[in-house]
Image (tube, rainbow, N blue to C red):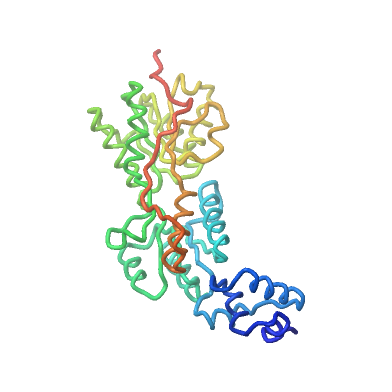
Amino acid sequence: MATIYDVSVLAGVSLATVSRVMNNNTKVSDKTKQKVLSAMEQLGYRPNSIAQSLASNRSNSIGVLVSQLDGPYYGPMMTEIETALRAGNKHVIIAAGHSDENQERDGVDFLISRGCDALILDVEAVDDEYLIKLHQGNTPIVLINRYIDEISERCVYLDNELGGYLATKHILTHGHKDLAYISGPLFKLDSQDRLLGHKRALAEFDIEFDQQLFYEGNYKELGGSEAMNAFFSANKPFTAVVCANDQMASGAIAVCLEKGMKIPEQLSFVGYDNIPFPQYISPKLTTVNNPIHEMGKMAAFWVLKHVYNDPKPLVENTFTPQLIVRDSATEPFKQ
């Protein structure tokens, strides 16, 4: 089996130079780097990652903890994280927290035990105090979709209150006064913020929030369909539905279509997130853009810049939601 010494002899360079090439040290010239790489290829030499980690005190791996691994929301985020880090010759280790405090804590412990150089966290159940304390440890962290004032420079987040406001205001400007609202799980901070924005828009138009036309969903299509069935069973009139995410909006609209209703002529809808598939259904869903893929990229850039001292990435911490107007909202239906 070839060794680093064999590589240095064949390439005609020192052991230190071979080590610099393996660690992507920029002080090595392109010509010398190519000689070393060619020698490694001829000998079939593969660097020992454990030995490299011991020598550099780096594992070149980043832990990523997300709420779940399925669905159209987290996939783009993880893709952007992995792409950005792979371009920086880093690798990711992924764990899921399932929006459960114990599982989120276990996930963090697992990633730290694997020697990750930093952690990118999309967590919902652990409290701010835990994350502030974690930040004070030896493993750097950056948060996605969460803001904590004490560690604001490590937070990459969207103004969800403004997003909730924009969604509801769009419906109100069409003349609707009787609005139903399908919320996400209220233990989630983004659900709370979107609901606050919804209520702010209602207050601006002097419309009272109607608890009978409120349903706490689960951010899944089933939550949207269950909400619509509950609204129809209540026998209370409403002309529009504001949904805290696109998946619930899709489930809600499906129930209406099964009843033979025309959307938006008989009932207007607005969603949130701007995931891909609602723009291809009929009617195309008006929604609020949630650039979770860009937030994932920025979290990766933060790690490259602050952990690996890469000067190139420009890190943006705060994102502003934008309303995407399509076909699912119009003036109230007149009998």
Image spot of residue 22 (x, y percent): 61, 75
Residue 26, quarter of picture: bottom right
Total count of labels: 0
The structure residue drawn at horizontal position 62% and vertical position 85%, both measured from the top left corner, is 15
Name the one closer to the observer, 40 or 97. Answer: 40
Image spot of residue 156 (x, y percent): 39, 54
Residue 46, quarter of picture: bottom right
Name the one closer to the observer, 82 or 276. Answer: 82
- Quarter of the image that includes the N terminus: bottom right
The structure residue drawn at horizontal position 35% and vertical position 51%, both measured from the top left corner, is 189
The structure residue drawn at horizontal position 53% and vertical position 61%, both measured from the top left corner, is 85
Image spot of residue 14 (x, y percent): 63, 84
Residue 226 falls left or right of residue 50: left
Residue 29, quarter of picture: bottom right
Is 250 placed above or below 172 here? below
Residue 321 falls left or right of residue 60: left
Image spot of residue 96 (x, y percent): 51, 61
Name the one closer to the observer, 318 or 75. Answer: 318
Residue 206 falls left or right of residue 5: left
Considering every residue shown, the one lying at the far top of the view is: 335
Residue 164 falls left or right of residue 307: left
- Quarter of the image that includes the C terminus: top left
Name the one closer to the observer, 163 or 89. Answer: 89
Is 55 placed above or below 74 here? below
The structure residue drawn at horizontal position 57% and vertical position 32%, both measured from the top left corner, is 280
